[in-house]
Image: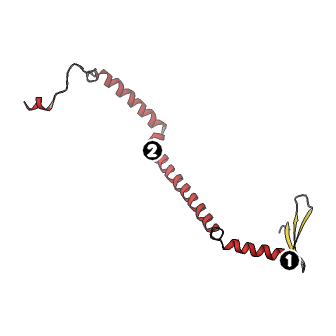
Amino acid sequence: PDEPTAWVVVGNMGLTYCQLDEDGSLEEEFVPLGQWLEDRKKFTRLQQLTWFKNFMVSKMISEWRSSTSRACFDRRLQLVENTSFLTDSKALDTLRWIGAFLVNELSSLSVLQPRDLSVQPMRLEDLAS
């Protein structure tokens, strides 16, 4: 296996954090034992706060929600693409042909001529008499 690039050395005076850089040089940071214990106590208190305590659960639920909603959207999109005849180029050509045919046929009918605007609509009283 690969050799570790970071490790901790524990001594009676404190901890030394060691890390190998990409160029192979060693970086060391010494932390006295008293300071480490104080930092550890602060970290434990932070972990007890509700937001920090529930962070991982909230993060996992958020990731799950976004991935499932994206997957659901992708499934529905695929369903629409597979079932929609409008995505087929032959169907679009056929619809264009039908539209042109209907326009030509309907324009030749006299029904589409503008109606006489001098004729007034009838009132209900006129129909009763």
In terms of sequence position, does the residue under pointer 2 or pointer 1 come before the other?
Answer: 1
Residue 72 image offset from top left, x and y in percent: 52, 56
Judging by the rendered image, the residue that carries numbered circle 2 is: 84
Residue 40 image offset from top left, x and y in percent: 77, 75
Q: Residues within 10 Å of mark 2 (few under 14, many from 20)?
A: few
Residue 15 location, quadrant? bottom right
Please report the residue visible at 74 percent of the width from the left and 73 percent of the height from the top: 42
Relative placement, left or right, of 58 versus 40 is left
* Residue at the right extreme, as displayed: 25
Q: Residues within 10 Å of mark 1 (few under 14, many from 20)?
A: some
Is 26 rendered above or below residue 36? above
Badge 1 marks a residue whose secondary structure is helix
Badge 2 marks a residue whose secondary structure is loop
Residue 39 image offset from top left, x and y in percent: 78, 72
Please report the residue visible at 9 percent of the width from the left and 32 percent of the height from the top: 128
Residue 91 location, quadrant? top left
Quadrant occupied by the N terminus: bottom right
Image depth: mark 2 or mark 1 in front: 1
The three-letter amino acid code for the residue at tag 2 is Ser
Residue 112 location, quadrant? top left
Cα separation, mark 2 vs mark 1, equals 69 Å
Q: Nearer the viewer, residue 120 or 101?
A: 120
Residue 96, numbered circle: none
Judging by the rendered image, the residue that carries numbered circle 1 is: 33
